[in-house]
Image (cartoon, rainbow, N blue to C red):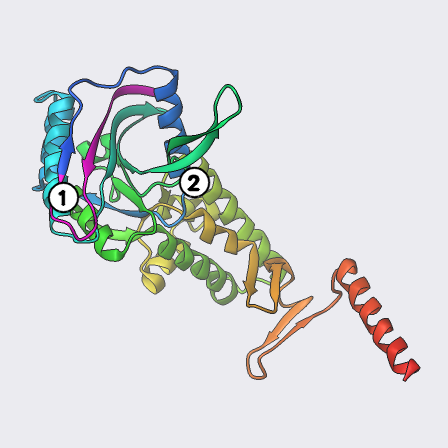
Amino acid sequence: MNINHIIVHSIEKEQHQTAITLHLRTEELQVDDKVVSLLEGVRSVYTNKTGKAFGMLGINRSFSRELKKFQQDEIEFIEFTNVAMNELKGHMAQEPLATGGYLLFSDFNNNGKHYFMVIMLKSKDGLSFDDELKLMDAHHLELDKLHFAARVDVDSWLSDAGENNVSFVKGRASSAVTTYFKEFLGVEEFSESAKTTQTLVTAVINYCRQELELDNEATESYKITVHDYCKSKHANEEPIFLDELSRFLDEETPSAFMEYAQEKYEIPNEFQVDIGKLRKFLRYAGYDKDVRISFTSEIFGTRVKYDSETDVLTIKQPPNSLKKQLVAEMQQENDVAGQD
């Protein structure tokens, strides 16, 4: 990863308060080992975060206008981030639940791609040990929790080559707080990777059963192919292109799956995969306070069957470890009954 520019500012605001204070750095952060570690850490958390949302930066919005000026060398990096902080201040003032934090702005290249990230970090109080092993108060950045973060694919955005040129994640904030951050970025054509990935899972399963009329074994093989393709794209931080996936699945009829998926499920041609939902290609799972069940999709319909009319789930050949526990429990109950 090559960091071109990076800076941090802070914004102070309490919930249900109107007072907002900005603290703006006058110089960029020096790119040393600590800064590289910081950005690599949050970038890794961001990449592996599930439930990311995607869209496009609005053309006539303040953030995108100023970002374009910076990318085209019309303004300096610090000037752009100062304008962005004042824009964020205006949006936060309209949201009572919004709270302050540290805003990290970074322009960098990674794996041959040019990105721009905006990340809101929070800090928390904690404890640590000093050199004499005495407890002391400590102040830590919550690097494992991205309260808000957005990443712009700069080349795709500037060339208008991609439908989804910006993605973002949020922490546990309310939808109202999410809205102000989205408004600050000027995101348009908002979509969710989790929902689209789940729709893709459904489309693939039904395509195998209804269109291709595959048996269970062939369906599993097909699903594994789709899963591995999507997983490799996610690992390389690349979007899924439905037309490319369709060609990958069947070279003889390269548009067949794409036409089915778009006609039946309205799946966009370009989207980002959600790694959590992708796992449903290979495993079903569910639980309540009394029961927890998980099994591979490969055995559904054979070892595991479900009757929707009677709401009964049947499991054949349960794991040996489970059988031993059940047999032991039954034996104990029989022994107690015999004593009576």
Residue 213 position by quadrant = bottom right
Image location (x, y in percent) of residue 104: 26, 30
* Extent of the magenta region: 1-20
In this orientation, does residue 9 appear?
yes
Of residue 83 and residue 229, the one placed in the foreground of this image is 83
Instruction: Identify the element where label 2 is drawn.
Output: loop
104 relative to 190, above or below: above
> What's under tag 2, amino acid-wise?
Asn
Quadrant where the C terminus is found in the figure: bottom right
Of tags 1 and 2, the one toward the viewer is: 2
Q: Is residue 218 left or right of residue 236?
A: right
Q: Is 110 placed above or below 87 here?
A: above
Could you say where residue 245 lies in the image, as x and y percent from the top left? 42, 46
Q: Residue at the location (60% across, 64% down)?
A: 292
Find disc 1 in the rendering and name its residue.
Answer: 58
> Camera-side residue: 203 or 236?
236
In the image as oriented, which residue stretches furthest toward the right? 339
Quarter-of-image position of residue 216: bottom right
Determine the residue positioned at 18% across, 23% down.
Answer: 25
Say if the magenta span includes residue 8.
Answer: yes
Is residue 250 visible in the rendered structure shown here?
no
